């Protein structure tokens, strides 16, 4: 590990010529922790050159000490007591990359109470306990940095908090879970079944310790919570996100979406409206010609619509060891640069200063208005007329209605693309379709997102 105790700088008036290294205590040396350790060691000179001082891991807490010793080698003290690291007087900054919410909350709050900065890639922790953690950090004048928590290698927190500060952000939308995007790509491109694709994502280290967080949309919702807070200056409110994963998505819909010129992606969307904000994670159809439709494998992409900037789009790895390390170390460099400055001079934790945060109301599902895709199984092809009449009767405007070309063994399927319609109207129409004698099975509905400027 890099151990340059004093980095010499060219003297500038009023600037110290040497600073001691930033001393890092790490909790967790798994996928993200080991990547962080490796990249810090490999790129130590460049990183120190950017930070203005060395960044040195001086202590690591791990559950499996022999395994940890194999990663960090000799010379870095190891402990199986995370709280020892979080509160140790020789630590300037705690890097929490163990994951989970209960104990991680205690470690992070203890580190903050001991005046340490915190860098974490733990989106679940911040989505659920962010309000408490950021308040404590403000009280103790320390930084909590979390670039690695959202769309790992993409510097989207920095883009929202710094690059786009001139804008009133209108919406943020993205593919923000690598595992599910990997699964959807494998199912579409290689015809792999869901379980096999998930197992591959797990083997590659993309999935959460409990992959239900990925496939049920919870991980994306954690990340969306942080994106929305930074975009709109709202508190982190995970409980307000409408969450739907990909576990009930059927291969038939992937094929039918293609027939209509769309691809299905798990999207996280935060949209500011007059009445409040929409916060939702769900599988949705995006036009096959849209850049977002071509974000494949474990890659992520985030689009931000600002009133001045227009639409901007960010693309990069959404999961992986060194990919996440890239963001964790960028946060460490920020901390190395800001250490010793007054808290009021720093970039606020959520982009806005505490007194300027707004408490925009989260809108309910029924208030969301988008186009929809419906797949309606019918007894015979002629019953497409009955489906059209029923939708018209419920004032659901139809853009396109065709018979599915795929899956004849499942019987005829009517595919419908609606014009934008309130969710409440769609729900009523689907209820009526389900009760109709013309309909032969469960009606599937998915949102259609144009993601246009
Ligand atoms: N399980 C997460 C994902 C890891 O697949 O996106 C990165 O946050």
Image (cartoon, rainbow, N blue to C red):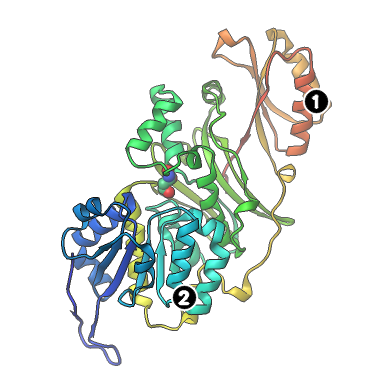
Quadrant position of residue 96:
bottom left
| Label 1 CA crowd tier, 10 Å (few <14, some 14–19, many 20+) | few
Q: Residue furthest bottom?
A: 14
Seen from the viewer's position, the closer of residues 263 and 203 is 203
Residue 20 visible here: yes
Residue receiving disc 2: 113
Q: Position of residue 123 (x, y in %)?
A: 48, 55
In the rendered image, the quadrant that contains the N terminus is bottom left
SS of the residue under disc 2 = helix
Q: Is residue 327 left or right of residue 348?
A: left
Q: Is residue 424 above or below residue 437?
A: below
Q: Is mark 2 within 8 Å of ligand 1?
A: no
Residue receiving disc 1: 392
Q: Which mark is residue 426?
A: none
Seen from the viewer's position, the closer of residues 43 and 370 is 43
Q: Is residue 248 left or right of residue 335?
A: right
Seen from the viewer's position, the closer of residues 160 and 283 is 283
- Distance between the Cα atoms at labels 1 and 2? 61 Å
Q: Earlier in the sequence, mark 1 or mark 2?
A: 2
Q: Position of residue 372 (x, y in %)?
A: 66, 33
Q: Is residue 303 above or below residue 15?
A: above
Q: Is residue 128 left or right of residue 330?
A: right
How many labels, in total? 2
Q: Is residue 364 above or below residue 424?
A: below
Q: Which residue is found at the position 38% from the left and 55% from the top?
A: 98
Q: Is residue 289 above or below residue 364?
A: above
Q: Which residue is found at the position 21% from the left and 65% from the top?
A: 76
The label nearer to you, 1 versus 2, is 2
């Amino acid at each position: 590990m890099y151990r340059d105790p004093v980095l010499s700088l060219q003297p500038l008036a009023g600037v110290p010529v040497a600073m001691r290294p930033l001393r890092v205590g790490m909790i967790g040396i798994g996928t993200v922790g080991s990547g962080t350790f490796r990249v810090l060691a490999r790129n130590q000179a460049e990183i120190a050159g950017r930070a203005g001082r060395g960044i040195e891991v001086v202590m690591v807490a791990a559950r499996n000490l022999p395994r940890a010793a194999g990663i960090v080698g000799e010379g870095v003290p190891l402990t199986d007591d995370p709280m020892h690291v979080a509160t140790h007087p020789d630590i300037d900054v705690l890097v929490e990359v163990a994951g989970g919410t209960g104990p991680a909350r205690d470690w992070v709050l203890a580190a903050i109470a001991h005046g340490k900065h915190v860098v974490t890639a733990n989106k679940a922790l911040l989505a659920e306990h962010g309000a408490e953690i950021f308040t404590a950090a403000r009280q103790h004048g320390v930084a909590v940095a979390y670039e690695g928590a959202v769309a790992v290698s993409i510097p989207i927190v920095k883009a929202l908090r710094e690059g786009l500060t001139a804008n009133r952000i209108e919406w943020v939308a993205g593919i923000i879970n690598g595992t599910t995007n990997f699964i959807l790509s494998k199912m579409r491109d290689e015809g792999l079944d869901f379980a096999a694709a998930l197992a591959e994502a797990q083997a590659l280290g993309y999935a959460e310790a409990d992959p239900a967080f990925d496939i049920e949309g919870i991980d994306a919702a954690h990340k969306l919570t942080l994106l929305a807070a930074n975009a709109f200056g709202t508190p982190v409110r995970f409980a307000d996100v409408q969450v739907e994963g990909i576990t009930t998505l059927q291969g038939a819909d992937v094929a039918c979406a293609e027939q209509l010129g769309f691809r299905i992606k798990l999207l996280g969307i935060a949209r500011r409206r007059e009445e409040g904000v929409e916060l939702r994670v769900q599988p949705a159809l995006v036009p096959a010609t849209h850049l977002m439709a071509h974000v494949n494998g474990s890659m992520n992409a985030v689009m931000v619509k600002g009133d001045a900037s227009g639409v901007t789009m960010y693309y990069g790895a959404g999961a992986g060891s060194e990919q996440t390390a890239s963001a964790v170390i960028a946060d460490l460099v920020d901390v190395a640069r800001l250490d010793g400055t007054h808290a009021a001079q720093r970039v606020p934790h959520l982009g806005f200063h505490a007194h300027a945060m707004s408490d925009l109301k989260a809108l309910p599902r029924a208030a969301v208005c988008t186009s929809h895709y419906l797949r309606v199984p019918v007894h015979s092809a002629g019953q497409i007329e009955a489906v059209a009449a029923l939708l018209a009767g419920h004032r659901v405007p139809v853009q396109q209605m065709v018979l599915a070309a795929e899956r004849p063994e499942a019987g005829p399927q009517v595919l419908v693309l609606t014009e934008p319609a309130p969710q409440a109207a769609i729900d009523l129409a689907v209820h009526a379709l389900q009760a109709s004698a013309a309909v032969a099975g469960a009606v599937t509905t998915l949102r259609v997102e144009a993601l246009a400027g």
